[in-house]
Image (cartoon, helix red, strand yellow):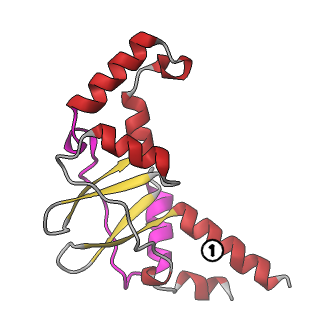
Amino acid sequence: MKSTELLNMKVKELMTSDLHTVKQDTLLKEVKNIFDSERIHHIPVVNDNNEFVGIISSTDVMLLLDWGTKLELPSSMRKNNFLLTSNLAKDIMETNVIRVTPEDTIQRCVQIFRENYFRALPVVDKNDHLVGIITTYDLMVFAYTVQGQLHK
């Protein structure tokens, strides 16, 4: 596959559509549990109509937690428990998020990633319903796989 073919592929061909999502009123404790149990770094936030309203990264949660967490200091663990059970997804989610559609090209995603400091793009339909997510990791794995096939 030539690089131009890769860049002209549609987002729907690479996006992840089996998503873990949360609502705005989800406790951060549940958000953290999803990050701890799944191998993901971004959780989209949706409303009751599955419309995209924001996104939370694992870094957002880690920045909230006390530095003493890694040392398992009792005071840090108490503080973290309080923070995780008294804050909601809407308290830390990013709402000013660029979205892409399933029909957008991979080239558009690459341009967005290169010009910004985030690593995930929600994929929405024309009614802003969440249908997937595409990440820099998805692009890297696919490019690596394609590159490996080219050398066989």
Residue at the spot x=27%, y=23% of the render? 82
Mark 1 nearby-residue class (10 Å; few <14, some 14–19, many ≥20): some
Position of 44 with respect to 17 (left or right) is left
Residue 70: x and y, percent? 54, 22
User: Which part of the image, by quadrant, shows the N terminus?
Assistant: bottom right
Judge left or right: residue 34 versus residue 91.
right
Residue under circle 1? 142
Give me the residue at 53% from left, 62% from top: 136
Corner quadrant of residue 30? top left
* Location of residue 83 with respect to 92 vertically, above or below: above
Q: Residue 102 lies in magenta, yes or no? A: yes
Which type of secondary structure does the marked residue at label 1 adopt?
A: helix
Q: Picture coordinates of residue 80 (x, y %)?
A: 36, 23
Q: Residue furthest left?
A: 48
- Image position of 50 with respect to 92: above or below: below
Q: Nearer the viewer, residue 7 or 145?
A: 145
Q: Position of residue 150 (x, y in %)?
A: 79, 84
Front residue of 130 and 7:
130
Please name the residue shown 25% across and 53% down the image. 96
Q: Give the magenta part as a residue range.
A: 87-116
Quadrant for the C terminus in the image: bottom right
Residue 146, quarter of picture? bottom right
Is residue 139 rendered to the left or right of residue 38? Answer: right
Residue 96 in magenta? Answer: yes
Please name the residue shown 17% across and 46% down the image. Answer: 25
Residue type at mark 1 is: Phe
Front one among 70 and 95: 70
